[in-house]
Amino acid sequence: WSHTTMAMALAAKRAISTAMAMRKGSETCGTVTWVRGFAAETGPVQTEDARVRMQNVDVERMFASGKKAQKTFLDNLLKVEPYAPSQERKENALPMRVIHVNRTCKVTKGGGNFRFAALVVVGNKKGGAGFGSGKGNEVPIAIEKAYAKAAKNLYQFDLYRAHTIFRRSDASYCKTKAVLMPAPLGTGIVANETIACICELAGIKDLRAKIVGSHHPHNTVKAVFKALENIEHPEIVARRRGLVAIEQMDF
């Protein structure tokens, strides 16, 4: 082994020892996502098992192994350290829904380098919503970046009696066309899953919607937000035109 690889192994083991010491006080850990893994473990993980895995790793045995075995040992050593999500998100943070996660792979001599791109939508369920995308080596990292962008990219929509939109609205983005139509109280959301997530976070309870053309999640989200943004309150439009707005139920 080179001095760099030995230093990486020793640094990883020290990091693992620190992580195990921090978690020593509790019997179980919550949901844990490994740094080098592809999937998250959703069930409770026993700290005792993780501690035993850490103690069973023999660095001297790693030095005497072949290159592939050395890489496997080092990967297993690094997998013990959990990924800690950002602590910036507060308890009263905006609700979030993950719309889409895309995975890319760059094939190199040492193997494939995976990266992930996440698209999320946030909202306060009172007419405010936003969307954002983020990239990272792990899914949680990409989601955290997307959440931070979405929280800074909020839109405020006008709702009719806090349950639907004022009028029909059409908007297009690239090859995707979104058609949003108001609905009476009690109708619910008659649309695909992507639009249903946006409406849920924006506080829209009754809506009929249709996507024409491409159903790409990024284009769908941008087209729906563009359609919602085009809807203005009737009183604002009437004031701009010098008229008087009169409510008329036609649905």
Image: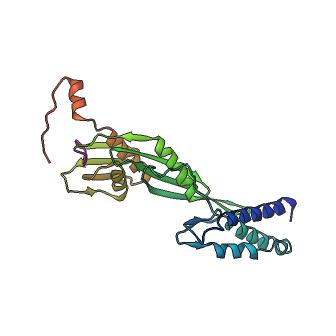
- The residue most toward the top is 242
The structure residue drawn at horizontal position 25% and vertical position 30%, both measured from the top left corner, is: 236
Per the rendered image, the range of residues in magenta is 161-166
Depth check, front residue: 88 or 146: 88
The structure residue drawn at horizontal position 64% and vertical position 62%, both measured from the top left corner, is: 35
Q: Position of residue 223 (x, y in %)?
A: 37, 45
Query: As drawn, is 116 to the left or to the right of 121?
Result: right
User: Residue 247's quadrant in the figure?
Assistant: top left
- Indicate whether residue 94 is drawn in magenta: no
The structure residue drawn at horizontal position 44% and vertical position 50%, both measured from the top left corner, is: 92
* In the image, residue 238 above or below residue 54: above
User: Residue 128's quadrant in the figure?
Assistant: top left
Query: As drawn, is 15 to the left or to the right of 105?
Result: right
What scheme was used to colour the molecule?
A: rainbow
Q: How many numbered marks are there? A: 0
* In the image, residue 42 above or below residue 131: below
Query: As drawn, is 183 to the left or to the right of 156?
Result: left
Quarter in which the N terminus is drawn: bottom right
Main SS category, magenta section: loop
Q: Is residue 117 visible?
A: yes
